């Protein structure tokens, strides 16, 4: 199974932009007010720095995924322990995303359809794509869904240009302190730092040329879309209203009305957004199954499907309410990112450097 550098770019951009734009605007506005767009800029820089770290670590072990080079560096048992936080993070994230989007569809579009049915439909489609074509199929799908998602965002901004009021961005740095702006950047940065998936994905890239540039470009593209989305939400609704909206970008699309002719664009956006969520679930279904197979030396990476898919569905089912979803997102920000995106990659980099120096000395 192989993917191209551009497929890696679109995989990372597609799976990151969906939930970042969907869920991270309101919390940032609540904390930083009309200066939330600055927080998004800072988040973009933080996400880029973390992406640089994890891609550099992955490039030190060409052709090997996280489970493989962890075993090589630390041995079979300690190598498995190193991968455990990643399995926990990917399973929790997959269940969180599946439940969040199923709840959204149930609330907005399909209120007569039980949430468990919506989750089962999304997961079944993800199982089919992943099981039949693996990362190659996911890469091709994201090569279509990614540009569509970005185009949808840009078109929605243009159609809402007449509703935008620059005065809603004033005063700049007037009501929020620098500390509040920095603190507001941590949550969106944690979504952009999801790029630590590259520790697995880099092993499938057929041509490693310019792989670092494309990885960084994918995160920065997501960051730019997040900044523009935040600016549009602030200019259309103002900070007071925006911080109260559960799905501010969706409400932004709903507000499109040009001459009473171009309106009701939200249905189209929902269907485009389903592509991104579908890609995200498919990707993490593949990553968890593949890494479990590598970790426990299972010949076929498809065999762990019998564990990974039901576990993702179970996690999504036991999430009781919106408060639990917010708690999981806080867990992702405060624990998962410091451990999986910063701490362990730095440890892997140090261990790799030490071992290579020892080999040269010998």
Image: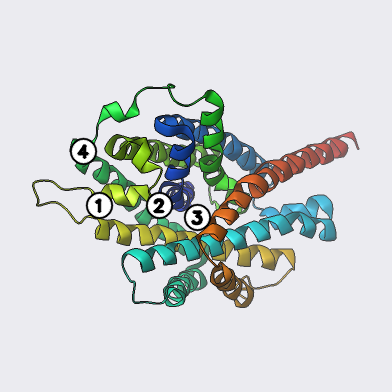
Numbered circle sitting on residue 4? none
Q: Which residue is mark 1?
A: 254
> Element type at marker 3?
loop
Picture quarter containing residue 111? bottom left
Picture quarter containing residue 343? top right
Between 179 and 256, the one lying in front of the other is 179
- Alpha carbon distance from label 1 to label 2: 13 Å
Answer with mark 4 or mark 3, whichever residue precedes in sequence.
3
- Alpha carbon distance from label 4 to label 3: 41 Å
The residue under the point 43% across, 70% down is: 122
Answer with mark 1 or mark 2, whichever residue precedes in sequence.
2
Q: Is residue 195 above or below residue 240?
A: below
The residue under the point 30% across, 50% down is: 251
Is 113 situated left or right of 353 in this image? left
Residue 65 locus on image (x, y percent): 66, 54
> Element type at marker 2?
loop
> Element type at marker 1?
helix
Numbered circle sitting on residue 3? 3
Answer with mark 4 or mark 2, whichever residue precedes in sequence.
4
Is 259 situated left or right of 179 in this image? left
- Alpha carbon distance from label 4 to label 2: 20 Å
Numbered circle sitting on residue 163? 4
- Alpha carbon distance from label 1 to label 4: 12 Å
Residue 32 locus on image (x, y percent): 47, 33
- Whether residue 136 is visible here, answered yes or no, is no
The quadrant of the image that shows the N terminus is bottom right
């Amino acid at each position: 199974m192989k993917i191209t550098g551009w497929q890696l770019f679109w995989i990372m951009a597609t799976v990151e932009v969906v939930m970042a734009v969907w869920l991270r605007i309101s919390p940032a506005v609540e904390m930083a007010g009309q200066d939330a767009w600055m927080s998004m800029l800072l988040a973009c820089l933080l996400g880029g720095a973390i992406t640089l770290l994890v891609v550099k670590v992955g490039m030190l072990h060409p052709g090997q995924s996280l489970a493989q080079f962890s075993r090589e560096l630390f041995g079979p048992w300690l190598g498995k322990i190193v991968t455990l936080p990643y399995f926990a993070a990917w399973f929790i994230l997959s269940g969180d995303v599946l439940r969040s989007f199923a709840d959204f569809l149930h609330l907005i579009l399909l209120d007569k359809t039980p949430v468990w049915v919506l989750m089962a439909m999304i997961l079944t489609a993800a199982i089919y794509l992943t099981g039949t074509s693996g990362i190659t199929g996911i890469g091709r799908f994201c090569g279509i869904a990614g540009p569509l998602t970005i185009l949808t965002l840009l078109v929605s901004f243009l159609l809402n240009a007449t509703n935008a009021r620059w005065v809603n961005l004033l005063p700049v740095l007037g009501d929020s302190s620098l500390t509040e702006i920095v603190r507001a950047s941590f949550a969106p940065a944690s979504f952009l730092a999801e790029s630590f998936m590259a520790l697995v994905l880099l092993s499938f890239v057929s041509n490693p040329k310019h792989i670092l540039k494309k990885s960084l470009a994918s995160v920065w593209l997501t960051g730019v879309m997040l900044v523009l989305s935040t600016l549009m939400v602030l200019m259309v609704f103002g900070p007071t209203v925006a911080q109260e909206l559960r799905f501010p970008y969706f409400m932004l699309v709903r507000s499109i009305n040009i001459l009473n002719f171009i309106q009701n664009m939200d249905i189209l956006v929902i269907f485009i957004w389903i592509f991104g969520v579908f890609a995200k679930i498919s990707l993490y279904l593949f990553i968890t199954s593949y890494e479990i197979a590598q970790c426990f030396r299972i010949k076929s990476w498809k065999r762990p499907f019998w564990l990974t898919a039901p576990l993702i569905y179970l996690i999504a089912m036991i999430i009781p309410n919106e408060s639990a979803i917010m708690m999981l997102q806080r867990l992702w920000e405060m624990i998962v990112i410091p451990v999986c995106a910063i701490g362990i990659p730095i440890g892997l980099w140090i261990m790799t450097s030490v071992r290579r120096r020892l080999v040269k000395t010998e």
